[in-house]
Amino acid sequence: MNGTGLCRGETLTTDHLVKVYRGVDRPALNELTLSIGEGQIFGLLGPNGAGKTTAISVMNTFLRPTSGGVTVCGIDAVKYPRRARKLIGYVPQDIALYPDLSARENLRFFGRIYGLRGKGLERRINECAEFVGLERNLDQRIFTFSGGMKRRANLAAGLIHEPKVLFLDEPTVGIDPQSRNLILERLATLKDKTTMVYTTHYMREAELLCSYVVIMDAGEIIAEGAPEDLLRRDPSCTNLEELFIALTGKQLRD
Amino acid sequence: MLKLWSCVRKELLLLCRDRVGLLVIFLMPVVLVIVVTLVQENVLRSMGETKTQVLFLDRDSGVVGRQMEEIIRKSDAVTIVKEIAGKQIDVEAAKLAVAKGDFQCAVVIPEGTTKAFMKKTREAVENSLAASSAKGKVRKDRLQEPAPRFLIYFDPALSETLRLGLTSLFEKVIMGIEMKEKMRVFSELLPVHLEAAAKEAMGPLWSEENRKMVSGARIEWDNAPIMVVEEKAAQYGAPVLRPNTVQQNVPAWTLFGMFFIVVPLAGSLIGERQTGMLTRLFVMPLSYLTMISGKIISYVIICVVQFALIMAIGRFVLPIFGAPVLNVGSAPAALILITVSAGLAASGYGILLGTVARTYEQASMFGAVSVVIFAALGGIMVPVYVMPKVMQSISVFSPLSWGLRAFQEVFVRGGTVRSVLPDTTLMLLFFVTTTLIAWFYMSQRGRTRIQ
């Protein structure tokens, strides 16, 4: 890492990642090699079953790859997962918060797990709440929140320790346009400090937010590049959604 | 350490906010211990295992009533009650109170009992003396006269054994009074009888000096018992306190309450798994050991609080309802050891259940039923010694039976840390085994997850 807190050069790399689940012949990830530079918002796109969540789960140290490697800010995340976890933030698809605790109590708990304490922790709680527009609701219990508020609190919990790499697994699913807009706006402001890996089914979101996208299918990369570069390569598509359908087909995925 | 403390605080905070969980953890065992103890206390009372309450109505206010009351009051088995709610009672009110089961029996001494009793006693002694005299006339008409009666009204639900016991007690009391009165009358009549007999035998030789000598004859009865019945419990080793309903129920339902933490504990694990919280926690710098230790410590703290609360109920609340005061023995360190061991055993079981069960419904149903089975086997509901031999041999496999045995060792037999070590060791082994099985199951299920 450099003095500003960013990692030098590539923040996150994967090297020929293979993941095969027990009892399944086809690999969920097949030789996935990525190189994500600092401050990048990296979009991981694909239909259901493409391997996006598996890729995130291996990269964020939740799953062990069948083969291949992952480095986070130069740390071998497969060999030293605990070291890597200090640098990683994760915003899961589910609202992974304690509904009977207030937003402040949830953030305080997560902050303490990352070793924050005292005034520094309270300052970060207030900053994160303000960042997601929940500063007035900090002492409200999560179960009283609307869907959008829960999503924003979920995001705040992933940011509490100022991670170097933030994994966002469909963070805007099922919320109102206002909350989605706020989340996207705020995430865009983070890119100077945090490298992000973002999965979504909303292609418009990826087009607006991501500096680089990878389209996956059946555990493999089928296209990658900056959104505008991808569209330039296929003039028949006017937006990322059309390109996505063109690449992955119209067949339903379950 | 900060992480562990954070996990403990979070768990305790979540438990404090979980109203249903709090009801299961605290209110349920408290209600159970009060209700079951008082119900059993009432049953034992009707079986004569506790002091029997007797309504005593002395309408005569004479010597018989006074002596009877005095002797009954000395009995350990009976308590005399002369008023209900601070008011004097009449025969009808007494019969109603007994019929309702508020009292086991009512003793009524009718007006004129003492007079009739004295008359009958004197006549009996006179007849006896007359029968032994050559010229004495036995008045057979007196023998036909009915003896004065006092009445006992029994609760119809009273056990036959207790009814016979009480009847026997009252007969013994009457016999004692009768004997005393007969001796008194005999002492009074003997000089008169002797004088008459001697005067007749001596004829003209009878003098004033003889009369003084005979009339001065007095009998001083020695009231010291001639033979005493000594009761002793057949037992080996050190003397034991007799376990009463409180000594049995308070530790028993405390353990039951402790083991019911398996439901909220398993529920919290399943909830974390289902909401994706576990995934989030697994990608944080937090080890599985710290996470689980946080839960275990929190729930052991809850168990200690449960224990203190229910002990306080045994000491201070149950006596208000007439139950005996709980005797907690004199080894607080042993009690802490038992409580912590039982808390750990319950936590281990909860973690195993929360790991193996797929849904909260599965865990709550299986957890509750299995704890009830463990409790039934462990002697929580019915003491192990009254179970059939087969069930007694099965009961040794219930962790609740180990806990209860250890508590009884301290409460009843004056046990120490050393004497409860075998049972607490079993509970700790149960904790280690269940936790290891849970860990093994967890690692098998998520074999590809990075630990």
Image: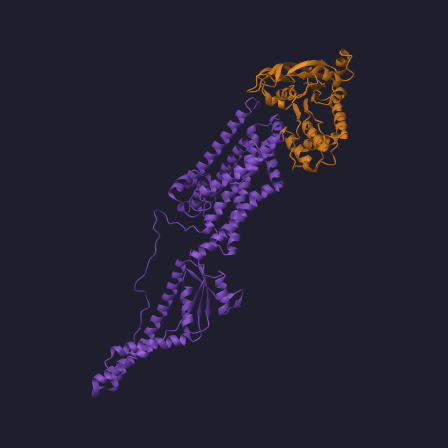
Chain colours: A orange, B purple
The x, y position of residue A110, in whole percent, is 64, 30
- Residue B69 point in image, percent of width and height: 42, 67
Q: Judge whether B256 appears above or below B218 on screen.
A: above
Determine whether A20 is above or below B220 in the image.
above
Dividing the picture into quarters, in which one does residue B62 lie?
bottom left
Front position in the image: B230 or A28: A28
Name the residue rendered at 47%, 54% in the picture: B41
Quadrant holding the N terminus of chain B: top right
Q: Quadrant of the C terminus of chain B?
A: top right
Residue furthest top in the image: A233
Q: Residue at x 61, y 40 (%)?
A: B18
Q: Quadrant of residue A154?
A: top right
Point 51% across, 27% down: residue: B440
B161 shown above or below A112: below
Please identify the residue farthest to the front as the structure is shown: A251
What is the residue that sits farthest to the bottom in this orientation? B204
